[in-house]
Image (cartoon, rainbow, N blue to C red):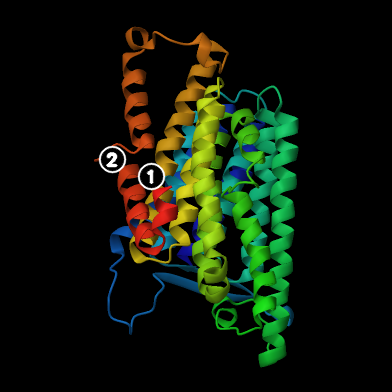
Amino acid sequence: MILIWLIIILLAGGLLAWIAGRYSSLACRIISLIAVSAGFLISLILWINYNPSLDSSHSQWIQEIRIDWIPAFGISFHLAMDGLSLILTALTMFLGIISVLASWKEITHKTGFFHFNLLWVLAGITGVFLAMDLFLFYFFWEVMLIPMYFIIAIWGHENRKKAAYKFFIYTQAGGLLMFVSILALYFINASYSGVYSFNYAELSGLMFSTTTGKWIMGGFLIAFLVKLPAIPLHNWLPDAHTQAPTAGSVILAGLLLKTGAYGLLRFILPLFPDEASWISPAAMILGVAGILYGAKMAFAQTDLKRMVAYTSISHMGFILLGVFSFTEMALKGVVMQMVTHGISTGALFMIAGSLQDRLHTRDIRKMGGFLSKAPRMSGIALIFILASLGLPGLGNFIAEFLILMGAFSAHPVITIV
């Protein structure tokens, strides 16, 4: 039941925070902090007790629970955690704590409703990382969407409504394409086996014609590329990151983008190996285009949060390059990149939000001379900027170096570019 508790604690904490917010803003903040801290503690206990074994007789799952939900349609409440899910769940809870602390003084109106949305988006993200039933996966994919829409639309900055609508439309369109692909897998499996099931293990061994496989994979791929985001499906990201409150930016950059990367690793490669191999050159080219385009656009920004947002597009290009290299070294780099980018970019958004809170502007041209006035913040900012640029010795360098080394053996020309 421990995996269910991870989600229930966040959902219940969100409801309690909303109720408490009517009476005391401080109470709802404390409830949120306790709920996310409890989730982080559970993740740490699972991590400490995790003993990866090379013995193939062991189950691949650290924890697993399966309960029939809607048996008539073959839908089960099936959660499972392996090493990848464990890392990303721990990252979710850690950045959740950071987000609650970042919004402690920034959010002053509708505080209870804000913390309700914050905890429910974290619950949705946790569910995405743990769901092993494709219907349940889609359910949690949608649970992430609505609270984040409210966080941007209600507590965002000057153009928040436009940014929230754009985020909602892009994500919803991608999600619906993925749902069509899930239904296609569901009915194809039933035609072969006579069993209607959304179970990941039962759908992972399916054989279908090349054309059918490409179309079904396309639905999943577009949904994950929108979330990652890869160009040309990136247009929602700069606006959403810029207009969201600090906690929203941290969760968007640190966690929501990682659900796209997780989807590529968990669904595209295992479910569609032949189709993924077919599209890999185009995907790697898109990754390189994202790296270069995101960097070039970041150079042109005068808005501090918008600049960090475009660097995220550049960094996510490395993930796309690594995933479709199909080499072990590159895939290790991808997982490392998911974690290190989440921490370093989350920190940069916190610093940008903190500066905006003090100066009431995000315009870099109006900033400067902070070293003498805010030496500690300047020092911390320098560390995370160096991490973000990939300074040797820091995590982002290790991640990007592994990806480039792995990609070079698969496709040297694209890697050199």
In the picture, residue 87 is in which quadrant?
A: bottom left
Residue at image location 65% in from the left, 58% down from the top:
222
3D distance between C-alphas at marks 2 and 1: 9 Å
Q: Is residue 411 above or below residue 392?
A: below
Residue at image location 31% in from the left, 21% down from the top:
379
Residue at image location 61% in from the left, 64% down from the top:
137
- Tell which of 124 and 334 is nearer to you: 334
Q: Is residue 27 left or right of residue 191?
A: left
What amino acid is found at the position of numbered circle 1 in the picture? Thr
Question: Counting residues from the N terminus, which is met first, the one under dot 2 or under dot 1?
Answer: 1
Q: Is residue 166 above or below residue 221?
A: above
* SS type, badge 1: helix
Residue picked out by circle 2 = 394
- Tell which of 224 and 23 is nearer to you: 224
Q: Are marks 2 and 1 in contact (CB under 8 Å)?
A: yes
Q: Identify the disc placed on residue 340.
A: 1
